[in-house]
Amino acid sequence: MDPLKPADPSSVAGYRLLGRLGAGGMGVVYLARSGAGELVALKAIRAEHAADPGFRARFRREAAVARRVTGRWVVRVVDADPAADEPWLATEFVPGPSLGEAVAECGPLPERTVRVLGARLAAVLAAAHRGGLVHRDVKPGNVLLALDGPRLIDFGIARTVGATELTASGVMVGSPGYLAPEQARLAGAGEVGPASDVFALGCVLAYAATGRRPFGTGAVAAIVYRTVHEEADLDGVPDGLLELVRCCLAKTPSARPTAREVATELAPPAGHGPDAQEPDTRGLDAREPDAPADPLLGPPSDHSPDWLPDGLPALIAKRSARVLDLPVPTPTVVDTPVPDAAALDPRIGPDDGPQGQQPPRGPARRRLLALGSAAVATAATGTVAWPAIRPDGRADDGPGGPLPRHRIGVATDLSGPGRAHGRAQERGARLAVETFNSRRDRPFDLELTVLDDRGQPAAARAAATRLVGDRAVVAVLGPGTVENARAVGKTYAAAALPVLTVTLGSNLYDVDVGPTYFELRPDNGQLIFPVKRYLEVHGVRQVVVVEDRAAGAFAWSIVKKLTDAPPNRARVTAVPVAAGSDDFTTAVRAAVASRPDGFVYAGNSPARAARCAVALRDAGHTGLRGATEPIAGPAFRTAAGTAADGWIIGAGYVDTAQMPGPRAQEFRTAFRERWRVQDAGPHAVEAYDAVHFVAEGLRRLGARAADRGELARRLGSVRYEGVAKTIAFPAGGNKVEPADGFFTYRTERGRLRFLGPYKKVTKDM
């Protein structure tokens, strides 16, 4: 538990706040004490989410659903106020660790413990299902371990069977790695039911018994692909549990046992020691407060910790003692108000600010590049665009002496295979720091520490260790590869250090990357959207997708997006090419025979895409052709020759050399003056925007010394209008909103022509 921050309130609705249990995109969870002395976990929702009427309505419904769940082995809701300015919800506080924490610290649990755990969780779910509720997010992080038994938490996204979704539509509800295939496919409300919870319970039992996720870790697309198409890794699951877990993980919902059947299977014979004490499931449905106890094993009477392995009872007792001995903290104070975007813009006159206030001004040493009036136009909505670029890099101290200094690390490939992208990022970041420090009205100064990770995990780990150890570093830009992200994620997460990558669209769902990891670009699979849009505006009616199975989940995710939502409701046919085959000619000839007017390569290999392009040309296909960013580089165009001409490519970065508009022009000019090059290169302007995005988070923090974890929380709520795109994250998410993060290119005479943001593509292009 962390102490309260200066910006935290001292109390909420009569609950005295004692400390922070956690924070995320939605809000902060506090440990609090009621007037009667009861400890609760109080979740306070941020005001920006509460301002959304749709969100508030969902929160009200979800709080009502959660309050219906009152059984012994669940953490019940004790109070809530969805109508408050900042809605909040209080639940019972359980001082024990989560199942995930316990396994991480003590290793896999013994079979006996897993059986008790499974029996009690299954009984909770059986009672919830009997009351018409589906949990939808059963995972190790939602299972708390107490001395007398486990507790299932977070019924906040539960829904009534057959009802419409309580959460926002069109999103995957649940946690990849612990969600059922029907959830992974974004199935309709009618398909996600009690059997989905049983699948998740099977995943939890496998994890508890082995210490591994049954469908592995890594990118969301890879986990989802394995969940839907591959068998679970159950190596190490005890023989006594193996068949039951395997049945729980059946791909077809109807083939899984019910939660009640799982509870019965895991329950020991009646009267056989403490494990024979089954949870009382009365009250799980508020409509049946007098329902009889579940007859599986009778009412509970034993609170023995014997079900836990050695080490865990002592850990739980230690945490409980620490919480009970907490002193009452001194009252906190609210954040000192900080100027809004308009007050930071020296171009705004005395009549432009609130109530005619004149912001401080001073003469600039060099020309300030306006980059448009976005800061003025968006100040009222909290959206900020830092307005000025200055290429000479000199800085003045603000009025009143030296300013606070915050350091941003850049850890990227400067000498390895990705050095072109890495150098572009470094230059963009340096220009951003120099620009920011040239502002007379800046509230602090920025510094950079740039380290070369050579594109190698070992070097990335060394860089991460150095940056984490430098307490002046408040955020890091990087890494550039998925392998490096996995290598350094745990190091950065342990230090609560925000990490922002502008090159990765992996959508990593891996515990090692932690909650402070942000991807400032859309998911790789979503990069097909520009191609889909181009096909739509050109009125295609029949599309063939070559699924290059050498690309695995990457290719599958593209095929799925096109077949689930075809452009113009066109007929979409997928034609596979085996991973071990280089023969694209056979597949292409069969596809062209149906005379499609659209053709998509679903893969990530420039060389294999070139073979596909040549086969298409030789087969006489003259319709539209498309692919995604992995083939955007010169390797595809060189290998395919004239067969590459006319391909439409969806990408997550802009080409500033071709990008229209005054802000892009100002960036090009400043970059050229600073670095003496004509082309900034891929991801330079994205890195420039990323630095200013961090600066805005620091400005909102309003403190001379920045807390890394608090900065990460603030970044989750910042909306920044950059030169390249808008940077904003959905509530609780680590991936930038994709609204305008996609861009369309077309290959022409061996070059890549930038067509602009994908939504602005027209039939004339």
Image (cartoon, grey):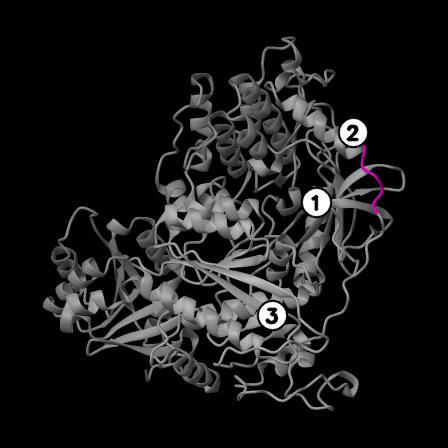
Which percent across, then down, holds residue 668?
41, 82
Question: In the rendered structure, which segment of residues is drawn in magenta?
Answer: 325-329
The reply, left or right, for residue 338 in relation to residue 577 is right
Q: Are marks 2 and 1 in contact (CB under 8 Å)?
A: no
In the picture, which quadrant includes the C terminus?
A: bottom left
- Residue 328, numbered label: none
The reply, left or right, for residue 236 in relation to residue 188 is left
Determine the residue positioned at 52% across, 49% down. 492
Answer with the quarter of the image where residue 699 lies.
bottom right
Q: Nearer the viewer, mark 1 or mark 3?
A: 3
Q: Nearer the viewer, mark 2 or mark 1?
A: 1
Q: Secondary structure at mark 3?
A: strand
| Amino acid at pointer 2 | Asp
Q: How far is the residue under mark 2 from the one under mark 3?
A: 64 Å
Residue at label 2? Answer: 290
Q: Is residue 704 visible?
A: yes
Neighbour class for label 2 at 10 Å: few (<14), some, many (≥20)? few
Q: How far is the residue under mark 2 from the one under mark 1?
A: 40 Å
Q: Is residue 740 visible?
A: no
Q: Vertical placement of 378 versus 160: above or below?
A: below
First in sequence: mark 1 vs mark 3: 1
Determine the main secondary structure of the stretch shown in magenta.
Answer: loop
First in sequence: mark 2 vs mark 3: 2
Q: Vertical placement of 252 versus 221: above or below?
A: above
Neighbour class for label 1 at 10 Å: few (<14), some, many (≥20)? few
Q: Vertical placement of 220 versus 150: above or below?
A: below
Q: Nearer the viewer, mark 2 or mark 3?
A: 3
Residue at label 1? Answer: 2
Residue at label 3? Answer: 445
Which percent across, then down, holds residue 104?
53, 32
Q: Nearer the viewer, residue 232 or 159?
A: 232
